[in-house]
Amino acid sequence: MQREQPMQQKPYTLLSLTKFVSCAILALGIIAQVQAQDKKVDPTGTWTWSVPGRDGGPDRKSTLKLKLEGDNKLTGTLSSPGRQGAQARETAIEDGKLKGDQVSFTVTREFGGNKMVQKYNGKLSGDTIKGKFEFERNGEPQSRDWEAKRATETK
């Protein structure tokens, strides 16, 4: 009679263990990346910034109220002080969009029968939006930097 030989178990080698650990680390990295992408940027809130006044006058503070609707539509208003100390004017934003961390919108105002269109673009990072806005003055394209800070909610 012939004796059956017991099955031999292959011990895990260092190479097998290294492969297993590498795959586990890679899988965890992918999961973390997917979760980070799921955390969408949300620009909803009240944002403020100041620009120097004309001819050395006091700084002019602007207030932007944004609301994210759906995945990428922005609505809201921009309030800026009137000229020469006049009351602040609130204007609805148009074409508001959020694409990744990029915010864009347009504001159209009318002064003395003339329309002035300002196109805002900025990158959202935490509680800061930093970018440029473009407009025309005397038929010439102009652009300025802007940096808004989100107001903290008070409860």
Image (cartoon, helix red, strand yellow):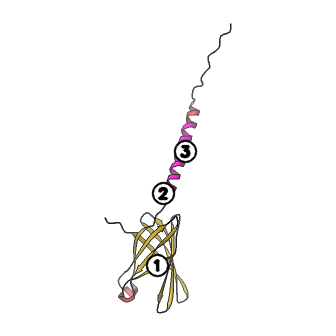
Quadrant hosting residue 62: bottom left
Taking the magenta stretch, the answer to whether it contains residue 27 is: yes
| Alpha carbon separation for disc pair 2 and 3 | 19 Å
Q: Which mark is residue 39?
A: 2
Q: In what element is the residue under mark 3?
A: helix
Coordinates of residue 52 in the picture (x, y in percent): 39, 81
Mark 2 and mark 1 lie on one chain; the one further toward the N terminus is 2
- According to the image, label 3 marks what residue? 27
Question: Magenta part of the protein: which range?
Answer: 19-38
Coordinates of residue 86 in the picture (x, y in percent): 36, 88
Mark 3 and mark 1 lie on one chain; the one further toward the N terminus is 3
Q: Amino acid at mark 3?
A: Ala
- According to the image, label 1 marks what residue? 92
Q: Is residue 140 above or below residue 149?
A: below
Q: In what element is the residue under mark 1?
A: strand
Q: Amino acid at mark 2?
A: Lys
Mark 2, other Cα within 10 Å: few <14 / some 14–19 / many ≥20: few
